[in-house]
Amino acid sequence: MSSNKPHRDTIFVEDARVLSHDAFDGDQYVLRVHAPQCAAHALPGQFAHLTVDPQRPMRRPISIMRVSADDGWVDFLYKALGEGTRLLTQRAVGETLSSMGPIGVPFDLQSAKRPLLIGGGVGMPPMICIAEALKKTDAQPFVILGSEVPFPFQPRPSQIMVGSMPDAVIGTMPLLEDWGIACRLASQQGYPGTFDGYVTDLARHWLDSLDADTRAEVVVYSCGPHAMLEAVVKLAREYGLPVQVSLEEYMACAVGGCAGCVVEVATDQGPAMKRVCVDGPVFDGTRVF
């Protein structure tokens, strides 16, 4: 019997060879693997389920940050928090790990004329993935990245104007700057060039600098901790903006079988329990908050 599930037959299991594995302050790591099938099919907002150690059968879900369909590599940014991700930090260049992906419902970018991308912590990768997907389009994204540990890159002053910004808020992610995409950073840790406050406060500065017609073109995309997403959706509601969020939940199977990652979502038929792994991880923010 046929299925109308959009992700049916699009999840690939492959042996992924570690190409690079770089450590950054704050127990953060960027892992690049050669996983050509995942790279060829991945879309912004999706993730892969990775083995962390040959002796550990349980995988870990990690958001996709970048892909190269031509060269077959996939980049992941993750933070070593528990035993599984700490085992993953030990995987060395040349080793292989099993990758299952890409998994999940991606962001809908079709209406993204003026996207506002807000990423916090390990919620930054999906925003970078969106930005790369949009860099050759007519969209005009503005990216806000927040972190309470050192950023997993060396911020540099931006030369791209983004409207009204608080004084001295000039720090950006070099990769986004090279792509010609406007970005600013937020943190309460006093890092040079960053906004001293929440990502939503910085987003408010930017939104208030736009005229009404321009602001009406904004679509909000976000990924990060639960409290941050809740604040992002509240901000979007205040300004009457559509908002899509990618949820972070603990997962066991990551393919919809165990239903261990369900969240309550408002539907036209009433409240329903949806699986973050395959019904998400991207949802209409107003329906989950």
Image (cartoon, grey):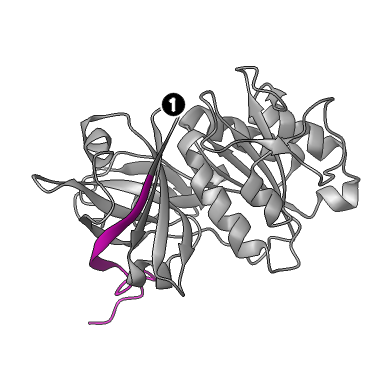
Q: Position of residue 46 (x, y in %)?
A: 42, 57
Q: Amino acid at mark 1?
A: Gly
Q: Residue at x 71, y 47 (%)?
A: 241
Name the residue nearer the viewer: 54 or 106: 54
Name the residue nearer the viewer: 107 or 140: 140
Is any atom of residue 109 visible in this view?
Answer: no
Q: Residue at x 60, y 17 (%)?
A: 189
Q: Position of residue 278 (x, y in %)?
A: 34, 57
**Residue with the most extreme bottom position:** 1
Q: Quadrant of residue 139?
A: bottom right
Q: Quadrant of residue 56?
A: top left
Magenta-tinted stretch: 1-21
Residue 156 position (above or below residue 112): above
- Mark 1: few/some/many CA within 10 Å (<14, 14-19, 20+): few
Q: Residue at x 24, y 45 (%)?
A: 91
Q: In this image, 108 relative to 105: left or right?
A: right
Q: Position of residue 257 (x, y in %)?
A: 20, 55
Is any atom of residue 145 visible in this view?
Answer: yes
**Residue with the most extreme right position:** 211
**Residue with the most extreme left position:** 55
Residue 74 position (above or below residue 236): below
Question: Which quarter of the rendered picture does the N terminus lie within?
Answer: bottom left
Q: Quadrant of residue 83?
A: top left
The secondary structure type at the circle numbered 1 is: loop
Please name the residue that numbered disc 1 is placed on. 26
